[in-house]
């Protein structure tokens, strides 16, 4: 089950719509495929100072601490019995990281083995280039 917690309004970010779809499709597919039977996924979005923060949290198997620094490397996949039948190429998070960098954003990963993981995307709020009072 996916539970959304989104505010009524969020500031704009300047981004390629398709790229952001790729980012969140990757994160959501991971949150689902590395989850347990009957597990849950939470998506929360919030303004955080000059950034928009979007968290994708799951109740899955989690990621061992020693694997965390390697998650966004191309072709890296965690080897653990619980997820050995899950298929993937190990490219999704490498792509997510690159796409966020292109948009001046970044990804933060927090995880506890056996409890779940939270992938948090930060993107800068778009500030209009129009000078105040220009009447444009
Ligand atoms: N939400 C998650 N919970 C637990 N492990 C995860 C999660 N997301 C990613 N991982 C681990 O990180 C590895 C890399 O993830 P990534 O999305 O880059 O590749 P993939 O899912 O294996 O393949 P692809 O996304 O290319 O189909 C995964 O193989 C998995 O071991
Ligand atoms: Mg993936």
Image (cartoon, helix red, strand yellow):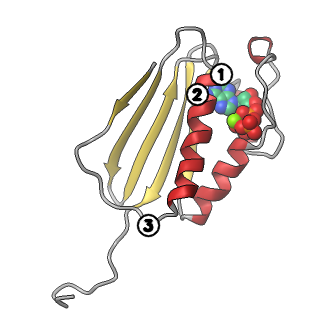
Q: CA distance from mark 1 to mark 3?
A: 31 Å
In the picture as drawn, the residue positioned furthest to the bottom comes out as 134
Asked if disc 1 and disc 2 are in contact, CB closer than 8 Å, the reply is yes
Q: CA distance from mark 1 to mark 2?
A: 6 Å
Q: Is mark 3 within 8 Å of ligand 1?
A: no
- Residue at 81% over, 17% down: 84
In the picture as drawn, the residue positioned furthest to the top comes out as 37
N-terminal-most mark, 1 or 3: 3
Q: Closer to the camera, 62 or 128?
A: 128
Asked if disc 1 and disc 3 are in contact, CB closer than 8 Å, the reply is no
Q: CA distance from mark 2 to mark 3?
A: 26 Å
Relative vertical location of residue 43 with respect to residue 116 in this rendering, above or below:
below
- Res. 107 in view: no
Relative vertical location of residue 57 with respect to residue 10 in this rendering, above or below:
above
Q: Residues within 10 Å of mark 1 (few under 14, many from 20)?
A: many
Ligand 2, seen in the image, is in the quarter at: top right
Residue 3 % position (x, y): 39, 25
Asked if disc 2 and disc 3 are in contact, CB closer than 8 Å, the reply is no
Q: Closer to the camera, 69 or 14?
A: 14
Q: Closer to the camera, 22 or 11?
A: 22
Query: Mark on residue 31?
Result: 2
Q: Quick check: 52 left or right of 86?
A: left
Relative vertical location of residue 66 with respect to residue 15 in this rendering, above or below:
above
Q: Is mark 1 within 8 Å of ligand 1?
A: yes
Q: Quick check: 75 left or right of 126?
A: right
- Residue at 48% over, 18% down: 40
The secondary element bearing badge 1 is classed as: loop
Give the residue number, with chain letter if any, for mark 3.
14
- Res. 127 in view: yes
Q: Is mark 2 within 8 Å of ligand 1?
A: yes
Query: Mark on residue 34?
Result: 1
């Amino acid at each position: 089950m996916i539970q959304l917690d989104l505010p009524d309004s969020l500031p704009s970010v300047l981004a390629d719509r398709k790229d952001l779809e790729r980012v969140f499709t990757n994160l959501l597919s991971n949150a689902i495929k590395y989850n347990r039977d009957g597990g849950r996924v939470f998506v929360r979005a919030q303004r955080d100072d000059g950034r928009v923060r979007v968290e994708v949290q799951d109740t899955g198997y989690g990621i061992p601490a020693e694997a965390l620094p390697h998650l966004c490397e191309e072709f890296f996949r965690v080897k653990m019995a619980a997820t050995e039948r899950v298929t993937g190429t190990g490219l999704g998070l490498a792509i997510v990281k690159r796409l966020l960098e292109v948009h001046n954003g970044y990804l933060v990963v927090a995880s506890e083995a056996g409890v779940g993981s939270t992938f948090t995307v930060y993107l800068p709020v778009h500030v209009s280039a129009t000078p105040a009072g220009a009447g444009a």
